[in-house]
Image (cartoon, rainbow, N blue to C red):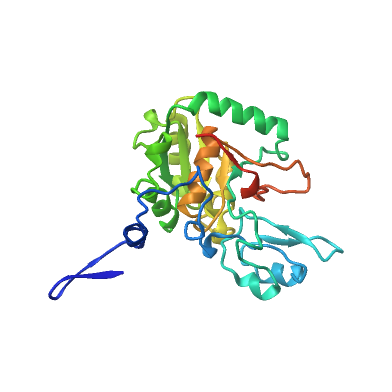
């Protein structure tokens, strides 16, 4: 948005700055309070199935295979780790709204190879992270082939509105100083070895956080010549933050889960596949 300063002079002003000036809000109240609708826009919410959803039609429409029907049944699964939130499936009866989808925040512990973690394993991991990273959490971001959308949303966390430093989270440019590696983008051949070397350079204990559909599943780049594989096939991933791109609040939630200051709600449903989040905002417990 442009604002008139003087005669013939205009400058660009960020929308979050204008909202802050208008409402007197300096910093987000999250996680002490639930995120506002402005902080979780409709474009950042995954599809929700309704009674009128046509799963077969949704599967045909979906460009990334995020919607999968169950054989012989008029039902299916939505793999949020593959979803790019394009909303094409809305014509097949899938809804995009806070009221229809209680899972508007989708970060979750990533799935270990061979199946989902049990609730006991999730609790054990949470308690371990809380003891290790509760005082400070330094994150290093690496781009393995992105469109730059997820990068910008991660960097937005350092502005005064989100102010991730207030929660003990800090950005760092050195793997030697990092506690966690944030990976954005669809892994390409040129970045394969660089990703592995960067991960190996981070001292233990360390975490890996996949931000966006691209590192989780490949997103729209699945099956392309340059795409290597989901990041989890190369290095262990601890937390998935689906989205295309996820909003800053969703990324912040994933960071809080990773460092152990927010307990995730988790499901033992064996039918839930990797990349399918079961997190509900109504069951979150923030500890700050």
- Location of residue 63 in the rendering, given as x and y in whole percent from the top left corner: 61, 67
In the picture, which quadrant includes the N terminus? bottom left
Which residue shows up at 50% across the image and 34% down it?
288
- Location of residue 187 in the rendering, given as x and y in whole percent from the top left corner: 50, 49
Residue furthest left in the image = 7
> Looking at this view, is 179 or 98 the one in front?
98
Taking the image as shown, residue 270 lies to the left or right of residue 194, namely right
Which residue shows up at 71% across the image and 67% down it?
59
Residue furthest right in the image = 72
Q: How many marks?
A: 0
Residue 188 in sight here: no
Compared with 131, 40 (above or below) is: below
Taking the image as shown, residue 101 lies to the left or right of residue 271, namely left
Taking the image as shown, residue 60 lies to the left or right of residue 258, namely right
Residue 239 in sight here: yes
- Location of residue 79 in the rendering, given as x and y in whole percent from the top left corner: 66, 55
- Location of residue 209 in the rendering, given as x and y in whole percent from the top left corner: 52, 41
Compared with 113, 87 (above or below) is: below
Which residue shows up at 44% across the image and 34% down it?
197
Residue furthest front in the image = 24
Compared with 236, 60 (above or below) is: below
> Looking at this view, is 269 or 101 the one in front?
101
Would you identify the image quadrant in which residue 163 lies?
top left
């Amino acid at each position: 948005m442009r604002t008139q300063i003087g005669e013939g002079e205009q400058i660009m002003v960020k929308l979050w700055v204008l909202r802050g000036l208008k409402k007197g809000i300096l910093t987000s109240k999250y996680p002490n309070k639930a995120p506002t609708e402005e902080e979780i826009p409709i474009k950042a919410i995954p599809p929700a199935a309704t009674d009128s959803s046509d799963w077969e039609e949704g599967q045909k429409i979906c460009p990334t295979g995020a919607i999968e029907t169950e054989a012989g049944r008029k039902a299916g699964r939505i793999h949020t780790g593959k979803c790019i939130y394009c909303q094409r499936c809305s014509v097949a009866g899938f809804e995009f709204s806070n009221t229809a989808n209680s899972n508007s925040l989708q970060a979750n512990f990533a799935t270990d190879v061979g199946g989902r973690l049990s609730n006991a394993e999730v609790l054990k991991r949470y308690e371990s992270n809380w003891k290790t990273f509760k005082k400070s959490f330094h994150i290093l971001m690496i781009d393995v082939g992105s469109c730059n959308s997820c990068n910008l949303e991660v960097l937005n966390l350092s502005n005064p509105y989100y102010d991730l430093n207030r929660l003990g989270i800090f950005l760092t440019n050195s793997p030697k100083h990092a506690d966690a590696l944030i990976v954005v983008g669809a892994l390409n051949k040129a970045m394969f070895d660089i990703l592995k070397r960067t991960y190996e350079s981070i001292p233990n204990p360390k975490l890996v956080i996949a931000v966006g559909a691209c590192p989780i599943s490949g997103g729209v780049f699945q099956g392309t010549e340059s795409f290597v594989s989901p990041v989890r096939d190369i290095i262990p991933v601890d937390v998935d933050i689906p989205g295309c791109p996820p909003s800053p609040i969703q990324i912040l939630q994933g960071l809080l889960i990773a460092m152990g200051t927010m307990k995730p709600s988790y499901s033992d449903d064996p039918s839930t596949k990797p990349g399918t989040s079961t997190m509900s905002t109504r069951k979150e417990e923030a500890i700050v």
